[in-house]
Image: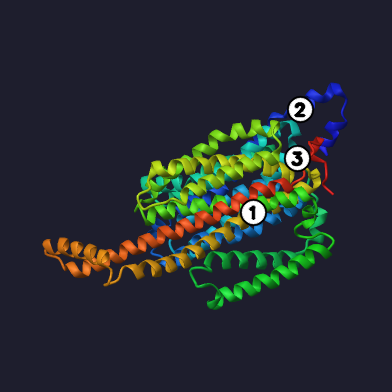
């Protein structure tokens, strides 16, 4: 709307239209910071689950729910936020979300048992989820297209940097203070964001009359569909997938929820999520790329710490310090990506980004048990640079050609695809790691037999070494040998995952050619229909 007005304005008015209202700028940056806190909170906690488990005396099967409850709640709220923003306005939705997130963070810090923590984390995820899409929607409605080269890298950086530096921040906080600070750290910034956004956001007006038409059945079916799907993906591998009755029930519930949700979305007058944005080819492709970016972003944020912890024996702070390289690479690439987005065809830019990411994962396929900071340096830089070069054009391609009235609902869907990509990616990665490790272990064990002279020599020398120290050499030598085989099997399973990721991102290099070159139409009002 505002953007279309800009297009039709007299030439003399153009400089005014291009000049940003400082109030709106401050409000936007406060929103960006709120989104940063909400996304960061997932990874901050994941790096320090062991400390929380000890602090709450929780079982190893229970502690995972600190993450799962947050993700399930967030994944329900993200697509819903577009509809809520239309009903109550972006100002009310965002500032209430920021306030609620802050209160839920304070409650999580006071949790005395695992049940309380799970409830508070679910509240945190649900309320915080409302902040993320609002930022994307605001960026594409309040800024003129000429400012996109500045705005898009900022939100792209925040959406990718927060999960990447999460382990570093989480490791530092739980080491230097205590796990309570993983949540307390949100309180002061949360209060500031709430006050600024409540007073300064004025992007749109509420349409309270729509509340009468709100599709409660659509909301319920979406909650069942996405919530159960997230549960199945999070818990599936640990519980041996469909041989577990809860996973099976979750999958059935998700399927039924999906049928009801899609039926309602296409038949009711005012659906809970507007799926018509997918009729825009660029938005559909942008969402597909965002889904795969979720696999790469969350998958590698999971794989690197897993390798460093399991094989190298690093603690959360050391893992964070090693992983910081990716975040730094993203931070330094963001302004470059912004500049390039005004000069390069976005499809070409995506191809460079995907190729950079694929090169990084290909280098990781040469992994050994001795790899440390310096061996991981180049793959991490390539990953950080690749993510930034992809994110900016993907955001522009997906949301840049939609009409302003479509963007609110579409940005929720767009962000949902990234989160679902992460969930699907982690489930697939975990399953592949488990299955391939078992397979590699069986293969390697075939060579460590009593009829293999090399294996016997190694075993004998280890046994003699331990015997010389007055220990039970034979037993310890066999345990050590088993440990070596397990470690090698684990590394080979990591390599398999990196090869699959290389193939996936290599394929995307060619898929980028299927997108239509987005028109730089004023106000992004191009092919929205």
Earlier in the chain: of badge 3 and badge 2, it is: 2
Residue labelled with disc 3? 141
The reply, left or right, for residue 477 in relation to residue 14 is left
Q: Is residue 32 visible?
A: no
Earlier in the chain: of badge 2 and badge 1, it is: 2
Judging from the image, what secondary structure is the residue with disc 1 in? Answer: helix
Earlier in the chain: of badge 3 and badge 1, it is: 3
Alpha-carbon distance for marks 2 and 1? 33 Å
User: Where 97 falls versus 197 (above or below)?
Assistant: below
Quarter of the image with the N terminus is: top right
Q: How far across and how far down the image is residue 10, in percent?
A: 88, 25
Mark 2 or 1, closer to the camera: 1
Q: What's the residue at 21%, 70% (across, down)? A: 475
Residue labelled with disc 1? 291
Alpha-carbon distance for marks 3 and 2? 13 Å
Q: How far across and how far down the image is residue 223, in percent?
A: 67, 65
The reply, left or right, for residue 147 in relation to residue 237 is right
Q: What's the residue at 66%, 50% (across, down)? A: 289
Closest to the observer: 168 or 89? Answer: 168
Q: Is residue 77 visible?
A: yes
Q: How far across and how far down the image is residue 474, in percent?
A: 19, 69
The reply, left or right, for residue 176 in relation to residue 456 is right
Alpha-carbon distance for marks 3 and 1? 23 Å
Judging from the image, what secondary structure is the residue with disc 2 in? Answer: helix
Residue 5: which quarter of the image?
top right
Closest to the observer: 79 or 369? Answer: 369
Residue labelled with disc 2? 18
Q: What's the residue at 60%, 32% (across, down)? A: 335
């Amino acid at each position: 709307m505002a953007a279309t007005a800009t297009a039709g304005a007299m030439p003399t008015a153009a400089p005014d239209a291009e000049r940003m209202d400082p109030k709106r700028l401050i409000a936007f940056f406060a929103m960006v910071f709120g989104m940063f806190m909400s996304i960061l909170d997932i990874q901050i906690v994941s790096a320090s689950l062991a400390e929380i488990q000890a602090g709450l005396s929780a079982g190893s099967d229970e502690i995972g729910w600190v993450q799962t409850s947050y993700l399930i709640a967030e994944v329900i709220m993200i697509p819903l936020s577009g509809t809520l923003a239309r009903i109550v306005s972006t100002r009310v939705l965002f500032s209430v979300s920021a306030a609620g997130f802050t209160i839920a963070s304070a409650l999580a810090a006071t949790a005395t048992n695992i049940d309380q923590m799970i409830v508070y984390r679910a509240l945190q995820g649900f309320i915080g989820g409302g902040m993320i899409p609002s930022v994307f929607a605001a960026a594409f409605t309040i800024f003129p297209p000429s400012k996109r080269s500045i705005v898009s890298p900022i939100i792209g950086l925040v959406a990718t940097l927060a999960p990447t530096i999460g382990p570093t921040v989480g490791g530092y906080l739980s080491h230097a203070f205590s796990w309570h600070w993983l949540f307390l750290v949100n309180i002061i910034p949360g209060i500031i964001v709430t006050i600024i956004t409540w007073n300064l956001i004025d992007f749109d007006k509420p349409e309270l009359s729509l509340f009468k038409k709100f599709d409660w059945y659509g909301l319920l079916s979406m909650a069942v569909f996405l919530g159960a799907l997230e549960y199945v993906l999070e818990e599936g591998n640990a519980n041996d997938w469909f041989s577990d009755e809860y996973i099976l029930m979750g999958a059935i519930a998700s399927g039924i929820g999906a049928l009801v949700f899609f039926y309602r979305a296409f038949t009711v007058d005012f659906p809970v999520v507007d799926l018509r944005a997918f009729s825009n080819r660029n938005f559909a492709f942008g969402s597909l790329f965002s889904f795969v970016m979720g696999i790469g972003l969350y998958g590698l944020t999971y794989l690197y710490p897993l390798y460093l912890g399991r094989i190298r024996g690093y603690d959360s702070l050391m893992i964070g310090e090693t992983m910081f390289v990716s975040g730094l690479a993203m931070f330094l690439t963001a302004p470059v990506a912004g500049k390039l987005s005004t000069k390069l065809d976005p499809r070409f830019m995506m191809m460079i980004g995907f190729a950079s990411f694929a090169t990084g994962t290909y280098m990781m396929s040469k992994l050994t048990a001795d790899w440390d900071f310096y061996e991981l340096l180049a793959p991490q830089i390539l990953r950080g640079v690749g993510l930034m070069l992809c994110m900016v054009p993907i955001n522009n391609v997906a949301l840049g050609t939609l009409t302003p009235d479509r963007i609110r609902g579409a940005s929720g869907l767009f962000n949902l695809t990234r989160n679902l990509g992460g969930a699907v990616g982690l489930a697939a990665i975990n399953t592949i790691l488990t299955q391939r490790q078992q397979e590699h272990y069986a293969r390697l064990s075939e060579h460590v037999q009593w009829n293999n002279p090399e294996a016997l020599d190694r075993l004998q020398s280890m046994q003699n070494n331990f015997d010389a120290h007055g220990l039970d050499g034979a037993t310890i030598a066999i345990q050590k040998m088993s440990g070596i085989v397990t470690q090698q099997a684990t590394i080979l399973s990591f390599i398999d995952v990196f090869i699959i990721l290389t193939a996936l991102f290599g394929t995307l290099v060619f898929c980028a050619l299927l997108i239509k070159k987005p028109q730089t139409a004023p106000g992004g009002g191009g092919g929205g229909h």
